[in-house]
Image (tube, rainbow, N blue to C red):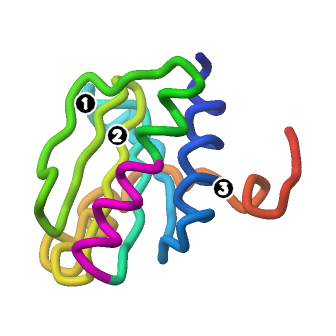
């Protein structure tokens, strides 16, 4: 599956479950960890788990399985799909780790077209 398709599925899954502050950053030129980080905030630890579960479910329906999932019961769950890493944060963890700032040299990915229902 193409990276753009994974991003779209994950963004829509997060949006459907009312994630906050969804953004995607292309990091391929900065690191070999992944091509993109997709980050979203949740309103509670239960919401963190629900968001991560929904991303995992929707990408699984599309035939994508995570290489790894970290932090299943914490304030931060990471889902590693190889070229895409999805970070689902509680408010405290997002502020503390501040990955948005750490990876600010990356290129922002336009996810608004997915949220608005546009197709590329």
Q: Neighbour class for label 3 at 10 Å: few (<14), some, many (≥20)?
A: some
x and y percentages locating residue 50 in the rendered image:
37, 61
* Residue nearest the observer in this picture, 110 or 9: 9
Q: Is residue 89 above or below residue 44?
A: above
Name which of mark 3 and mark 2 comes first in the sequence.
2
Name which of mark 1 and mark 2 comes first in the sequence.
1
Confirm or deny contact between disc 1 and disc 2 (CB under 8 A).
yes
* Residue nearest the observer in this picture, 5 or 72: 72
Q: CA distance from mark 3 to mark 1?
A: 21 Å
Point out the stretch of residues depicted in magenta: 44-54
Q: CA distance from mark 1 to mark 2?
A: 9 Å
Kindly identify which residue carries mark 2. 85
Q: In this rendering, would 36 be left or right of 12?
A: left
Residue positioned 39% across, 41% down in the render: 27
51 is within the stretch colored magenta: yes
x and y percentages locating residue 118 in the rendered image:
88, 51
Kindly identify which residue carries mark 3. 111
Residue positioned 74% across, 53% down in the render: 114
Residue positioned 41% across, 34% down in the render: 84
Kindly identify which residue carries mark 1. 33
Q: Secondary structure at mark 2?
A: strand
């Amino acid at each position: 599956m193409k990276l753009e398709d994974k991003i779209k599925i994950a963004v829509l899954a997060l949006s459907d479950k009312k994630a906050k502050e969804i953004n995607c950053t292309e990091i391929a030129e900065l690191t070999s960890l992944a091509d993109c980080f997709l980050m979203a905030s949740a309103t509670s630890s239960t919401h963190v788990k629900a968001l991560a579960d929904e991303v995992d479910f929707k990408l699984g329906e599309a035939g994508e399985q995570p290489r790894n999932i970290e932090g299943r019961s914490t304030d931060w769950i990471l889902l590693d799909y190889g070229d895409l890493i999805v970070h689902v944060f509680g408010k405290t963890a997002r502020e503390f780790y501040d990955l948005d700032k750490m990876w600010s040299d990356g290129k922002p990915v336009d996810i608004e077209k997915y949220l608005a229902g546009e197709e590329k």
